[in-house]
Image (spheres, rainbow, N blue to C red):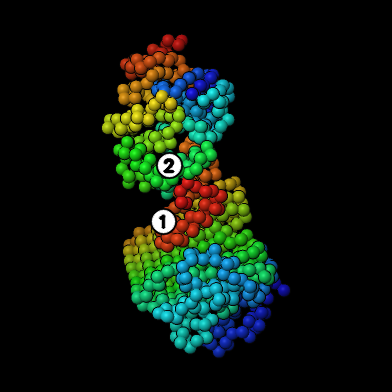
Amino acid sequence: MDFKEKLLDSHLAFEQDVDLLHPIHKYRKNALKRFEKDGFPNKSDELWKYTSLASIVQKDYHLSPISDSNIELKDIKRYFLNDIDSFKLVFIDGVYSPFLSKTTHDGMDICVLSAAISKSKYKKTIKKYFNKIVPKNDSLSSLNTSYTKEGAYILIPKNVEPEDPIQILHFSTGVQNSIWLQPRNLIITESNSNVQIIERHQSLSEHKVVTNSVTEIYAESNSFIDYYKIQNDLLSSSLIDNTFISQEKDSNVSVHTFSFGGNLTRNNLRFYHKGSNISSTLKGLTIIESRQHVDHNTLVNHAKPNCESYQDYKGIFSDSSVGVFNGRIIVEKEAQKTNAFQQNDNILTSDKSKINTKPQLEIFADDVKCSHGCTVGQLDKQVLFYVYSRGIPEKEARALLTYGFANNVLESVRIPSLNKRIKKLIASKLGVNLGFDL
Amino acid sequence: MLEINNLHCEIEGKPILKGINLKVDKGEIHALMGPNGSGKSTLANVISGHEDYEITKGNIYFKSNEINELSASERAHEGIFMSFQYPVEIPGLTVTNFIKTAINETRKAKGLDEMSSREMLKKIREKSSLLDIDSKLLSRSLNEGFSGGEKKRNEIFQMVMLEPELAVLDETDSGLDVDMLKIVANGVIKFSNDNNAVLVITHYQRLLDYIVPDFVHVILDGKVVKSGDKSLANRIEDKGYDWLKKEIK
């Protein structure tokens, strides 16, 4: 039986565990039908031209994995941002761990989606937001929707600003090999609220795991969200991240994606504008090697006037690694005075590494300022010689130039401890210890 | 300190240096002059260890050791510094972080501990004021958006920070106005002492009015054809190089 068949057949068993009468169940049912019809994307799909899921979906996976209940704080603590006792949602093999998490319902909701689905007081909110911006034609999102059960639920009410960043951490332990995880996150920031969120998917041991995640984010008027994705997983792990963001007027949302490791990583990041004076920022830094594959697929849909979007993706590819950047900006007729910028710069450090980059602009309004561009190159030999001539050896010189190249993506990371953490990750990836705090 | 014997070198198969002989001792300032394409910058690059230049014959000795096979960074650790004719820009890397890394990598290579932040800061303050460098410039990306003069001054700043034993200044005077020329020259003069040496490569005698050389060499078609004192530079300023070309024939 192929894996698609298994997903369809196993849904009956999945239904044993969920409330079939809950309004969202019809979304699951409809989504399953769509997935049955569409199946997994393949290379004939324009959006999947350079990324093949074949090697992944031809295998078999456990759909409701057994969670390792022996995981303790000490096993995962190093993935926490800092020692302070901030809010975090920890999932072990797809199962929420209350013991390792810190949630709240006091002044805001930071809890799990299963709780929000089951409790009647969230019914209205779930009805208003759940699955409202997930495109129907996206089969992987449909698959996720059909199996929606668990994930993060965050609601920041009007005028609230949580002091510390909220962390969403998904760990897989390898207690069972070959697992397929489908977390579903719902995040709502009401007007004038301000929140920082960090999301990470991490395997704790070498084992086959595929995560097909969907995150819906609703930024109400004049709310601010800084969202950081840290992708630095083991070579045995793959991630398909589908993030959909709906922004109301005067809102400001930034998403930083740091892709430093994993087998195959696909980021589908879509912004939809619902009001004017919106600002959207999409930044990405990819540093990969061996046979890793990272694909950034972005969409910014400018639908209203006086909005701006800023995209800056940088990639450094070594060995036989492959990068894909497919960035699309749509400026609808109504979206006059749009200011949209997009840039994708890449460095290939080896003959076998590869980047497929495709910036796209579709403009239907006439009074807009849009630009896009991409570059592919190598570290400049003369620049390297200059750095060597100052006594900096090859490995350190390359690291220094890489750091310089990547720096403007880091500059906008507004959480100092996270900024430091990412610089450390870069330094360790490049295998150097430089004389300044990289 | 530096001894070059019958050095032949080519780039992409094309011979550039055709038997250079040069000896520079501690405490000396040498000037190397020559027309465009004579091999001046090539010599600077070869001394610094640029990989594109292939030594086909001859040797370079530094402090009595042959350094032909040393990499550029190893030569820097030995104490060789080159001020670039065209300093490169490195966006995203501040002058301060660059110089800190350079100093600490050199210390690491010598088995020394990293310089403490306090000591580093003190040194940066001291040396930047010597060259009249605004501290704002030091927190900007290396050479990015710097004027020609600022770039050259930044080269000399790196030199005085790294304190090499041999400084090769490749056309450091080009693109400088008189005021900046004085600042840069003053930095070189203050740097020069009995334990180090300076090799000034220049087209014009102008810089040598400020940095007075002990020896002047003229390079023509990949060879040092004449050596003398400061008066040789004056003669070249007056008469150009043609008389020398005739003299050789």
Residue at left offset 59%, top offset 53%:
A289
Please name whichever residue, B111 or A317, is drawn nearer the observer in this view of the structure. Answer: B111
In the rendered structure, are the residues bearing label 1 and label 2 in contact, judged by CB atoms less than 8 Å apart?
no
Residue closest to the far left:
B179
Residue at left offset 51%, top offset 63%:
A230
Locate residue B52, reporting x and y percent: 53, 33
> Can you tell which quarter of the image residue A7 is in?
bottom right
Q: Nearer the viewer, mark 1 or mark 2?
A: 2
Mark seen at residue B80: none
Compared to A181, does A123 lie above or below? below
Compared to B144, does A297 lie above or below? below
Q: Which residue is mark 1?
A: A411
Compared to B180, does A188 lie above or below? below
Classify residue A219 as left or right of residue A240.
left
Please name whichever residue, A233 or A300, is drawn nearer the observer in this view of the structure. Answer: A233
Locate residue A346, reporting x and y percent: 50, 51
State how far apart marks 1 and 2 are (Cα).
20 Å
Residue at left offset 42%, top offset 54%:
A408
Label 2 secondary element: helix
Label 1 secondary element: loop
On what subunit does the disc labeled 2 rest? B
Please name whichever residue, B158 or A313, is drawn nearer the observer in this view of the structure. Answer: B158
Label 1 packing within 10 angstroms: few (<14), some (14-19), many (20+) = few
Compared to A310, does B157 lie above or below? above
On what subunit does the disc labeled 1 rest? A
Mark seen at residue B99: 2
The amino acid on which the numbered mark 1 sits, given as a three-letter code, is Glu
Classify residue A414 as left or right of residue A231.
left
Locate residue A101, reporting x and y percent: 52, 74
